[in-house]
Image (spheres, rainbow, N blue to C red):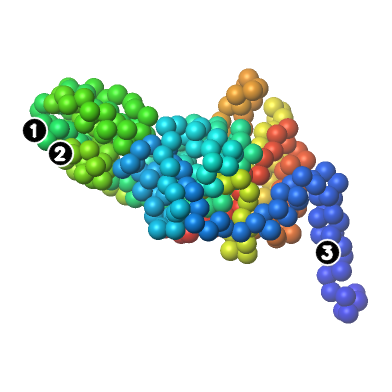
């Protein structure tokens, strides 16, 4: 063995593997290069789904602080993504996962449709409260409005009150606004303390979520990736051939390259009946050779592949 050139064979193999990415992965590498040349926008215009008092607004304020030039509200998740794509805002803030109710599936479906990237994430502790008109009591309530995720997160409390019908609404804050405008003592909403203050509602019951340690993860969406050495989490979406062992074969590339897979979620493909999209989060940075090798192999074996982003994950 030639001691003057240690690991020459291994280095050659790695070089060949990385070079192979350029054969079929120029688009992927161009995305990464663009991300390396893009930095965080100062004094950005930021959008969220809902209205004043929503958890989306709270997440945006906590993540960006006082540095926002403008904070805009949108009716739907799709509206936020469209605003980022069209350059109306610089960043969008969307809920993607709750620790008790699971994934916000609509957001998962939407982020694949847009040519946008996840550039950050923020975890928000969620405390739900039953809100009614100032003169209302719990015994008066016959209907409660809130986002389906919030209703699901308070399911145990609602089961104790079978006389209350739960009705899904677009957003927790919009539900509070609706109850305030209707002026009906029999209506209530589930939302934050800030909602009660903004819409002059009374807190009929506090902290009614089933799991007290209840958190929602929000993602920050932008037109371009913003890569740095601190980025430690990668999100991708892909679809494999509908054949035996295909998913195992794709996922094995993460293990072979020493990468930790932290999440996998499947969703039906809307454009291909009986085929599925897999959303995967792994630990790593797009400047690392083993990451590039793994993603190149995954991409080559996938019928659909989309790099969703590389961003900083903070342990809670």
Image-quadrant location for residue 33? bottom right
Q: Is 112 or 176 nearer to us in this picture?
A: 176
Would you say the residues marked 1 and 3 are in contact, meaning their CB atoms lie under 8 Å apart?
A: no
Using the image, tell me which numbered label, if any, was put on residue 13: none
| Residue bearing mark 2 | 202
Distance between the Cα atoms at labels 1 and 3?
Answer: 74 Å
Q: Can residue 218 be seen from the camera position used here?
A: no
- The N terminus is located in which quarter? bottom right
Could you tell me residue 235's position as x and y percent? 60, 47
Secondary structure, mark 2, is strand
Among the two numbered marks 1 and 3 on one chain, the one whose residue lies closer to the N terminus: 3
Among the two numbered marks 2 and 3 on one chain, the one whose residue lies closer to the N terminus: 3
Distance between the Cα atoms at labels 1 and 2?
Answer: 8 Å
The residue drawn where x is 60% and y is 24% is 270
Q: Can residue 49 be seen from the camera position used here?
A: yes
Using the image, tell me which numbered label, if any, was put on residue 135: 1
């Amino acid at each position: 063995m030639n001691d003057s050139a240690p690991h020459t064979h291994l280095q050659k193999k790695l070089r060949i593997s990385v070079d192979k990415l350029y054969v079929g992965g120029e688009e992927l590498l161009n995305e990464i290069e663009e991300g390396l040349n893009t930095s965080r926008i100062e004094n950005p215009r930021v959008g969220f789904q809902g209205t004043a008092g929503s958890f989306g607004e709270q997440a945006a304020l906590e993540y960006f602080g006082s540095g926002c030039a403008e904070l805009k509200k949108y009716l739907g998740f799709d509206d936020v993504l469209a605003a980022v794509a069209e350059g109306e805002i610089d960043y969008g803030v969307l809920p993607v996962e709750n620790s008790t109710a699971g994934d916000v599936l609509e957001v998962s479906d939407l982020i694949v449709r847009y040519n946008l990237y996840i550039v950050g994430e923020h975890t928000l502790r969620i405390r739900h409260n039953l809100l009614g008109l100032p003169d209302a009591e719990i015994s008066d309530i016959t209907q409660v409005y809130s986002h389906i995720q919030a209703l699901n997160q308070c399911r145990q409390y609602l089961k104790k009150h079978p006389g209350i019908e739960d009705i899904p609404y677009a957003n927790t804050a919009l539900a509070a606004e609706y109850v305030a405008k209707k002026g009906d003592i029999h209506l209530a909403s589930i939302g934050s303390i800030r909602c009660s203050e903004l819409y002059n509602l009374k807190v009929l019951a506090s902290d009614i979520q089933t799991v007290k340690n209840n958190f929602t993860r929000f993602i920050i969406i932008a037109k371009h990736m913003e890569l740095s050495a601190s980025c430690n989490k990668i999100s991708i979406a892909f679809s494999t051939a509908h054949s035996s062992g295909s998913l195992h074969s794709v996922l094995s590339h993460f293990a072979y390259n020493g990468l930790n897979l932290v999440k996998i979620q499947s969703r039906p493909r809307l454009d291909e009946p009986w085929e599925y999209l897999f959303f995967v989060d792994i630990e790593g940075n797009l400047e690392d050779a083993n990451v590039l090798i793994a993603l190149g192999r995954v991409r080559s074996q996938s019928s659909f592949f989309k790099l969703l982003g590389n961003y900083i994950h903070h342990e809670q």
